[in-house]
Amino acid sequence: MPLQCLRSMPRQHVRPFVDSSIVEATSAIAAAGRAGAWHFVVDVLHRARSTGLELDSAIFNSAASAVRRSQHWELSLQLVTVGRQDGLPWSTRSLNAVISAYEELGLWPSALSLLRVFSQIGLRRDLVGLSAATSSSAKGSCWPAAVLLWEEIAWRGLEANIISCNALVDACAKGRRWQLCLEVLEEAVQRRLHPDVVTYGASIAACDERGGQWRCALALFDRIISHSLEPTVVAFGALASAFESGRQWEFVP
């Protein structure tokens, strides 16, 4: 069925999907998620449960992922919880879905606690979950946890990406650890993660956070220019603030 039809599909048309098989119901949910039709996702899952189909982890994971794409984080969390209440076991995908929801809801302690479940049930932490937990720690200004998670990504042999790197740099900046920011930045360069304007902007901000490192901030800004990146308002503001903190009035606009 064309994806554009899913958004306007009346409720009575849901039943043929869930009456046929769990496979078709799961496929319908996945298609609805790609179309952004999260109401349809909930309808399919509700009717599948009410008709007595034996639901598995796959359909709940698909539903949670589908509504998460529409940024309905609380609903995503609730769907995984319902699956657990139905007696379904944790999976890497369901755990990652909950960690991502915790990240967006600002519940970083819960995200970190959930990481422990992986080892408790014999599942291997992957890049998705570790990156989400790193971002969650950054949003909670918990830089020590973000550093440990970044190190875990490395020793597990996972391919880190610039998103998780930026989350760590942001966490260190908020924690006023400008030297650590620079270490992470250089590590990102060595690992060919291609630091972007977000990476440099956060590092410049870290140099300003009472660090008084205006020369370092200026050098980082020069790297933005030399790498043909487009400086953001945040980067300009952080540089100006660093000049002001260092009493370099001749540079302050």
Image (cartoon, rainbow, N blue to C red):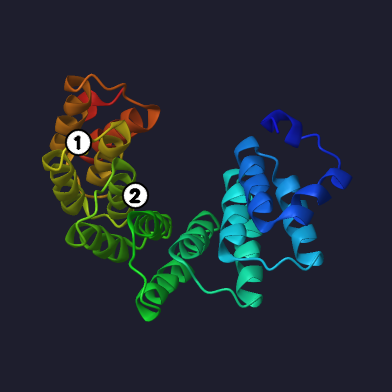
User: Residue pushed farthest left?
Assistant: 190
**Quadrant location, the C terminus:** top left
Q: Quadrant of residue 4?
A: top right
Q: Is 149 or 221 nearer to us in this picture?
A: 149
The residue carrying mark 1 is: 217
Q: Nearer the viewer, mark 1 or mark 2?
A: 2
In the image, residue 6 lies at what x, y percent? 74, 36
Q: Is 201 placed above or below 184 here?
A: above
Residue at x 61% of width, y 61% of height: 60
Secondary element at tag 2: helix
**Quadrant location, the N terminus:** top right
Q: Is 189 placed above or below 47 here?
A: above
The answer to whether residue 73 shows anywhere in this view is no
In the image, residue 56 lies at what x, y percent? 60, 66
Residue at x 34% of width, y 49% of height: 167
Q: Is 223 placed above or below 116 here?
A: above
In the image, residue 217 lies at what x, y percent? 19, 36
How far, Cα to Cα, is label 1 from label 2? Answer: 19 Å
User: Please, what is the three-letter code of the amino acid marked with disc 1?
Assistant: Ala
Secondary element at tag 1: helix
Disc marking residue 167: 2
In the image, residue 69 lies at what x, y percent? 57, 44
In this rendering, would 101 be left or right of 248?
Answer: right
User: Residue pushed farthest right?
Assistant: 12
User: Please, what is the three-letter code of the amino acid marked with disc 2?
Assistant: Ala
Query: How many marks on residues?
Result: 2
Residue at x 31% of width, y 45% of height: 166
Q: Is 161 or 123 nearer to us in this picture?
A: 123
**Mark sitting earlier along the chain (1/2):** 2
